[in-house]
Amino acid sequence: MRIQLLIAAVGPIFLACSLSPAADREAQSPGASDRRGQEPQSSASQQGAKPSAEPQALFSKGQTALQSGDLDGAEKAFRQVLAMDPSAGAAYSNLGVIAMRRKDWDQALRLLEKASTLAPKVSGIRLNIGLVHYRQGDYAAAIPPLSSVLRDQPDSQQARYLLGLCNLFVQDYANAVSILEPLWPQKSDDFIYLYVLSITAGAAGQKELEEKALTRLVEVGGDRPEFHLLLGKAYLNRQETGKAILELERAASANPNLPFVHFNLGIAYVRTGDSERAEAEFRREIAIEPDVPDTYELLGEFYMRAGKETEAEKSFLEALRRNSRTAGSHFGIAKIYLHQGKYEQALGETDTALHLAPGRQGTHNLRGQILGKLGRKDEAQAEFAQVKKMADSSYSKDLESFGEGRVPNPELTQQPPP
């Protein structure tokens, strides 16, 4: 059984906004669900002149094709609608949904932003924009559209949960807790939600809530391997490595091919100093899930610790090939280039890492070192001054250490299979 954490926690990922082909700026009542159980967020109708029958018929044809999974047929119909009515926000929205299902995130974003311009009050479009940013790993960019959805629909569990996750991933732990905790009455039997709440509360220093969520997690988890995986991760986050290994090994024993169990065992064995076992676990994870960038990034950090720069660079590049937004891999490559005397290339990598994760103390520190090597002393001193001002020492925690940092959560961010 593949764990589909995000799906289980927040429902369907792709939400086709069922709008009329002449959608304007006024949202109407929700439409019907499609065959996959995806709930359209809202529908909008044109006020004034009634659209002609032909675009309406084409739009209906596109909707039917989309609901049946005929993406090519749906795209053709919606583009025909736009040829007749370039202001049809509904057609742009559904073309965005088609691009999402194809995982063409850049194209999806362009189409959905156009749809949002034409129908700014339709919250379902903004939710999909947030989802696209989420799938791209740009959690900071996902926060504004998801926040706007939650303002319009305070009872939207999906928007609230996704917004909480995004705040968790950008390390705004206090805000993440305030967003996630209100879901307790509806989701206190959901062991995935309880895991997310426990690690978020722990990171925010709210120990009472962390214990409450963890206790409830144990109560509702049962003996499923997915539960032992999450409980093991919770122990890793609490620096209780021995307990973590016991739970993770139980999960692996019950299901050796469970995604992400070997990923976390690799982290655990790095912490215990068992390098041979750690590398083997990371390799097992890659065999099970070959397209998860986080595993290659951690393997790169592992090789860096062992002084194996060639292997480390290869792993970081594999991570970036799968997701160019992995700041830790750019950081790792910058360190390698600095050591190799490739200062200009190292500077470019640190600049990219800072663009992706601007609050990282260690990246500023590394950039200062590189600027010093380039003879740009004033700029280097400015970077070191910035390091001193930064209260959060996330440098060692998030980019360089398996020991003190919070554990990555790729199982919360990866796209599940269709």
Image (tube, rainbow, N blue to C red):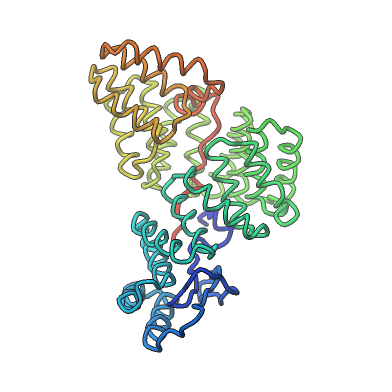
Q: Nearer the viewer, residue 274 or 289?
A: 289
Q: Quadrant of residue 356?
A: top left
Task: Reply above or below: 49 against 396.
Answer: below
Residue 233 image offset from top left, x and y in percent: 58, 38
Is the C terminus in the top left, top right, bottom left or bottom right quadrant? Answer: bottom left
Q: Total number of numbered labels?
A: 0
Task: Reply above or below: 58 against 95.
Answer: below
Q: Residue at x 55, y 68 (%)?
A: 41
377 horizontally vs 10: left or right: left
Residue 406 image offset from top left, x and y in percent: 55, 32
Task: Reply above or below: 75 against 52.
Answer: above
Q: Quadrant of residue 112?
A: bottom left
Q: Which residue is at the far front?
A: 48
Q: Is residue 83 visible?
A: yes
Q: Residue at x 29, y 17 (%)?
A: 339
Residue 292 image offset from top left, x and y in percent: 40, 45
Task: Reply above or below: 377 against 42.
Answer: above
Q: Nearer the viewer, residue 210 or 227?
A: 210
Q: Nearer the viewer, residue 404 or 85?
A: 85
Q: Is residue 299 visible?
A: no
Q: Residue at x 41, y 58 (%)?
A: 113
Residue 280 image offset from top left, x and y in percent: 41, 34
202 horizontally vs 311: left or right: right
Q: Nearer the viewer, residue 247 or 25?
A: 25
